Image (cartoon, grey):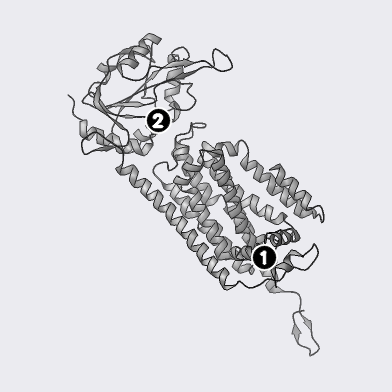
């Protein structure tokens, strides 16, 4: 019956006896079960708190609204720049998007990590029933590799209505300055391959409301539920054209 | 992984059993296939479906095979050396094992846990080890080497159906019918093959709900047949009084 007999068991011997659980074991068992249920409840509570946090936390603009994006003050004016769209026509950003809910993003189609999920999440959010219509403008920061055809093909993976813009490096740098985002820069590949470079670029999506100002920006990491929370509120708050 | 296999073969060299060895090697191979590239890599940060496929393979395929591959004398010797027999006996009770398995399932699939652990190698490793340990415990009363830990066939059938079949459908349903992606680690990952994050999550939920069913029902069927055979019993033989009693 004792545990020591187990220790001397050698291969081929009969199975050790099976002692009934002692009262102490039962207490441990109950404690373990309570611990497990407690752990499960803790996780559920944490999930609930997190979900609540997603709804109620966020940045504020000084008004009563809270945003899942990052509020900026003072608000940025809709920038004025002209680039070339994927069909080769000039695209005057300020004139084409004036008075419309607009999302502006600088990136490139070879981006390995930020641009594809950022665009996919925005697209899936805009596809959600009840979401307002928005004009999405993607400006390439890699005009050498992002030909209009490649840009169009890449954007069509997300949404055929997304606008793609390109231009000379100088024109793109001017657009970045006008939008008040950090300038993009080429980062050479470690292996020295001249075609295998990456491009550092601003990772936030800037949302202009119909008042032609950007009150909130969306850095990489915002999720579909953040967009679906904010976009209707943005229109409700700043939906009137200036 | 190599150490696990070498350790097993070395320990079992004393009394090799061909069938058990192949069971263990099969379980080990599935464990490796679920952990290594591509499934392990995809599950660790790209696709919720890969994460869930890993989970189902770990818990419904690798764990029972590993359990079938462990010789009785090895487990008895190991448990006595660790003085863990009594604890394992308690943990292997169907109610306890089923509860632990499902608490682990819920905790390790909660968004907060997945998002926190999947972003690091150590966290992913902790998830894998937890899954495997809980699954070994789940299968111990069903196909473990210690007969005294196994309840009757009907109890085993009910236990397995509830613990591994019915309860996992609840979180699986949450994933399948959620209107937004729940795991930020998979939502923010670069998409693989144009697979939308929500579609990916719904597929993962479906895998959790029904991915285990083929094996589960096969095992339940097998146990039911054994139970029926046991109930039928051997052909009765007359005793000295002329009455027929089971031999």
Relative depth, front residue between A2 and A134: A2
User: Which is closer to the viewer, label 2 or label 1?
Assistant: 2
Residue designated by label 2: A220
Relative depth, front residue between A190 and B204: A190
> What is the x, y in percent for residue A185?
44, 15
Residue in the image at 43% along x and 56% along y: A41
Rendered-image quadrant of the N terminus of chain A: bottom right
Rendered-image quadrant of the C terminus of chain A: top left
Disc marking residue B17: none
Q: Is residue B169 left or right of residue B5?
A: left
Relative depth, front residue between A168 and A189: A189
**What subunit carries mark 2?**
A
Residue designated by label 1: B225
Q: Is residue A94 left or right of residue B81?
A: left
- Any part of residue A100 in sight: no
Mark 2 nearby-residue class (10 Å; few <14, some 14–19, many ≥20): some
> What is the x, y in percent for residue A203?
39, 25
Q: How far apart in space, not on screen, are marks 2 and 1 (Cα)?
A: 56 Å
């Amino acid at each position: 019956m004792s545990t020591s007999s187990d220790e001397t068991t050698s291969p081929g011997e009969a199975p050790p006896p099976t002692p009934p659980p002692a009262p102490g074991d039962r207490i441990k068992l109950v404690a373990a079960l309570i611990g497990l249920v407690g752990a499960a409840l803790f996780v559920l509570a944490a999930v609930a708190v997190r979900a609540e946090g997603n709804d109620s936390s966020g940045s504020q603009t000084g008004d009563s609204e809270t945003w899942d994006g990052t509020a900026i003050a003072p608000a940025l004016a809709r920038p004025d720049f002209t680039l070339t769209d994927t069909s080769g026509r000039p695209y005057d950003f300020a004139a084409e998007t004036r008075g419309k809910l607009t999302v502006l993003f600088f990136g490139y189609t070879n981006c390995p990590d930020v641009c594809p999920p950022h665009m996919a999440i925005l697209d899936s959010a805009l596809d959600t029933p009840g979401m307002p219509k928005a004009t999405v403008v993607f400006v390439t920061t890699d005009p050498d590799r992002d030909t209009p055809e490649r840009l169009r093909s890449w954007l069509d993976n997300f949404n055929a209505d997304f606008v793609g813009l390109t231009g000379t490096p100088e024109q793109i740098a001017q657009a970045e300055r006008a939008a008040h985002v950090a300038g993009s820069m080429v980062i050479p590949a470690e292996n020295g391959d001249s075609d295998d470079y990456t491009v550092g670029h601003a990772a936030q999506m800037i949302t202009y409301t119909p008042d032609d100002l950007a009150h909130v920006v969306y850095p990489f990491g915002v999720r579909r539920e953040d967009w679906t929370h904010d976009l209707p509120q943005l229109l409700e708050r700043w939906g009137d054209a200036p | 992984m190599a150490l696990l296999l070498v350790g097993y073969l070395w320990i079992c060299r004393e009394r090799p059993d061909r069938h058990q060895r192949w069971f263990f090697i099969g379980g080990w191979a599935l464990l490796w296939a679920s952990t290594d590239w591509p499934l392990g890599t995809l599950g660790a940060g790209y696709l919720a479906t890969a994460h869930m496929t890993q989970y189902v393979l770990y818990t419904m395929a690798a764990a029972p095979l590993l359990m079938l591959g462990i010789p009785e004398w090895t487990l008895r010797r190991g448990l006595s050396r660790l003085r863990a027999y009594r604890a394992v006996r308690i943990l292997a009770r169907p109610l306890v094992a089923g509860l632990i398995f499902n608490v682990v399932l819920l905790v390790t699939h909660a968004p907060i846990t997945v998002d926190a652990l999947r972003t690091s190698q150590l966290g992913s490793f902790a998830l894998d080890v937890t899954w495997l340990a809980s699954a070994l415990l789940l299968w111990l009363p069903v196909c473990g080497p210690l007969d005294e830990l196994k309840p009757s066939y009907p109890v085993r059938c009910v236990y397995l159906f509830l613990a591994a079949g019915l309860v996992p459908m609840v979180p699986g349903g949450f994933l399948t019918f959620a209107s937004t992606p729940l795991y930020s680690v998979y939502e923010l990952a670069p998409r693989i093959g144009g697979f939308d994050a929500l579609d990916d999550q719904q597929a993962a939920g479906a895998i959790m709900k029904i991915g285990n069913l083929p094996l589960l029902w096969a095992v339940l069927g097998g146990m039911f047949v054994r139970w029926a055979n046991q109930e039928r019993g051997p052909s009765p033989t007359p005793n000295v009084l002329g009455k027929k009693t089971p031999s």
